Image: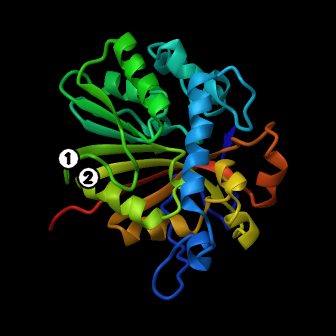
Amino acid sequence: MARALSLRGKIPGIPCTRQSTESGMVTTFAQRTAPPLDRGRLRTAIEDAFTDLALHPERNFHFISGAPLAETLQYEQRLLDGVPRAALASFSGVGNPWRLGPLDPGAHVLDVGCGAGTDVVIASRMVGPSGCVTGIDMTFAMVERTRQAISIAGVSRTWARWGHAEALPLPDASIDVVLCNGVISLTPNKIDTLREIERVMKPGAELRISDVVVEWRLPPHVAESIPLWTDCIGGATWLDDYPVLLREVGLDDAEVCETFDVFSGTRIEPRSSLFGARGANIRAWKRRVR
């Protein structure tokens, strides 16, 4: 069930104003302490986990997935009715971008970490034939799942491409809306990833992030643990840091709009509760050229 995160009086939909700075720049705990995290091993572990979800969605994972996850995140059934069954079966995420409102017809949309294509298909139906949607994922099996979903759904001007969030294969200032569901918590260098996302956004474009946030800072042994990173806890961002991280890369008016109890009932619930880990819908806009 979604609910507001009770942290120092924050209210869903009210712009965040608290800042937490160290040496003039805000980063995650993991970045500040520069842990000896093997990024190659981390990337392989993440790819393995999501390849498994793409190819074997019936297995019992440490996270909620598929239709049960969509229900937990309060996806409306009318949106899911047009999503191919295989795409929904391999669905993963930590928030619901559609609770922030529909997309405008004709919009150019990017889904960073598109997974099996659930949000890609929903976005494509919203923007219509005058818009376009591109899904990017670093897992080949997920890219193939999204391509199959696009074909089965029969949506036009919609593509799935392989790539990394830190090096998006798109030109500057080409996107009206960026979706990013459950990705930032899996990227070691969040500033570089957010800068790359900002690069492809048009002035005034909207960013809808769904990500794992924590109420308390993570100790070093958590930030260094690859299993906890693949659990979406080791790389989670402290809630108060998010607005400042976004502002650092040129994104303004950041809001933490709503949070979701995505770890309830999973085998990692005890660990996630130690740090108040939850999924969150966060939005911000790229600064307009003056």
In this view, 275 is above or below 20 = above
Task: From the image, tell me which residue sits under label 2.
Answer: 200
Q: Nearer the viewer, residue 94 or 55?
A: 55
Residue 100 in the image, given as x and y percentages of width and height: 45, 40
Q: Can see residue 184? A: yes
Residue 4 appears anywhere in the view: no
Q: Picture coordinates of residue 232 (x, y %)?
A: 65, 50
User: 158 and 258: which one is in front?
Assistant: 158
Task: Give the vertical position of 99 relative to 6 (above or below).
Answer: above
Q: Are marks 1 and 2 in contact (CB under 8 Å)?
A: yes
The residue tagged with tag 2: helix, strand or loop? helix
Q: Earlier in the sequence, mark 1 or mark 2?
A: 1
Residue 24: x and y, percent? Answer: 45, 86
Horizontal relation, residue 287 to residue 181: left or right: left
Which amino acid, by three-letter code, is at mark 1? Ser
Residue located beneath label 1 in the image: 174
